[in-house]
Amino acid sequence: MRTYIKKAAPPEPQDKTRLESTVRSMLADIAENRDEAVRRYARELDRWEGSEFRVSADEIRKVEKSLPESFKEDIKYSLRQVTGFARKQLETLQDFETEIDPGIILGQKMIPVERVGCYVPGGKFPLVASAIMSVGTAKTAGAGYVTACAPPRDANGMYPYTLYALHAAGADEIYNLGGVQAMASMVHGCVGMKPVDMITGAGNSFVAESKRQLFGAVGIDLLAGPTEILIIADETADPALVATDLLGQAEHGPDSPAWLVTTSAALGQAVLKEMDLQLIGLPTRKTAEPAWRDHGEIVVVGSHDEALAVSDEYAPEHLELMTARNDYYLANLKNYGSLFVGEESTVAYGDKGVGTNHTLPTSRAARYTGGLWVGKFIKTVTYQRLTREASRRIAPVISRICNVEGMLAHQITADVRAKRYA
């Protein structure tokens, strides 16, 4: 039986009609009017009056000289971690060919997506590390050309740290462009861009909706909502550390859920008190406090088995383990975006560059998908090759299946081979 020391109110049904209509109108406008529409939205929404959207090599060099060496070294470290892990993932993806039956040879090939568009959000927190997660991973996968966009912060363009990270990660072209207009421009090849085959990146509700509507014309990484954290903890956990990590994610925004599932009511009560204490001095209290107040939960369960079941039901984006049985959870948990095993690891490590990717499924999507990884940028394609004898042998089987389905033209393609190779 689960009990709640703190429970969030059920989410109110959202009417996205206006959002969907606004984005649909913008996308149609850009598809028809291209550069003129993009420039108009850039002026209205980003206040961008620059004559060019693409960042020049001189501008990149200027920013590179202006930033502290410590930041450049940190970016190099994170990039090395993320791309190193991506290369290890890439090694698990193999071309192969097998003779599955005499004369029937089937194969698999791994082909990287040729052109990728990567978006890095600006907003309240410019997610510099997103440049590494998207551009760096796409390049490691073998993407032939990467276009990167980030919204301008002022008349000089995007956040300099973001620009440097995009360049360091290997972007082939970089544009001062945000929001729906950035996504549509990458897809349609506006303002001098090469049109892409796939778009990635987080952003606000307009960016997410534009990705949803553009999916099909291009591929996407995934659709992400507000970020989430769930911590499973028992009586061995430090309540102050649990509270710190919950607030670490709650600062993303007032709609970011933070959940604790615990086998110890005493720990749950202690964490509740710690949250109030730590919020007092938290620099980002303005966003973290309403997130915790409106979306935070503390769930007490009767066993580790029940904690595991509750966590799998929530299917959180980020899942931390602070228990005496972490290996049990690692072996048995099924639904999460990324798992942080033990108090020594924390979500911030994954978000900023320990090596795993921080683009992860939210809103219970972890029930059916993982996050961004090197394989997302690779198409797994198949081929077949048959001997004449094998083609003659399989033709009657395929013919009969086609006949049952009523697909008579399909049946003929099998029948003519049965006669041809008799």
Image (cartoon, rainbow, N blue to C red):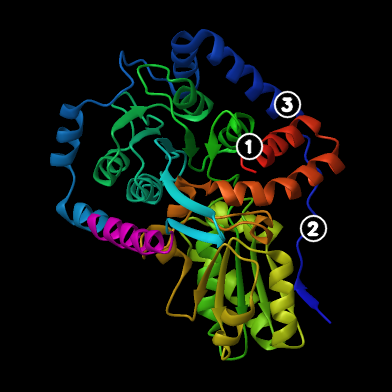
Q: From the viewer's perspective, tell me whether residue 183 is left or right of residue 16.
A: left
Q: Nearer the viewer, residue 373 or 47?
A: 373
First in residue order: circle 3 vs circle 1: 3
- Against 353, is 49 above or below? above
Q: Nearer the viewer, residue 210 or 270?
A: 210
Residue 60 picture location, percent across and down: 20, 33
First in residue order: circle 3 vs circle 2: 2
- Against 183, is 359 above or below? below
How far is the residue under mark 3 from the one under mark 1? 60 Å
Q: Which residue is mark 1?
A: 420
In the rendered structure, find residue 18 and report the number of the disc placed on it: 3
Q: Which residue is mark 2?
A: 9
Would residue 152 be counted in the magenta stretch? no
Would residue 80 be counted in the magenta stretch? yes
Q: Would residue 233 be seen by someone viewing this image from the given angle?
A: yes
Question: Label 2 amino acid?
Answer: Ala
Q: Would residue 225 be seen by someone viewing this image from the given angle?
A: no
Q: From the viewer's perspective, tell me whether residue 176 is left or right of residue 413.
A: left
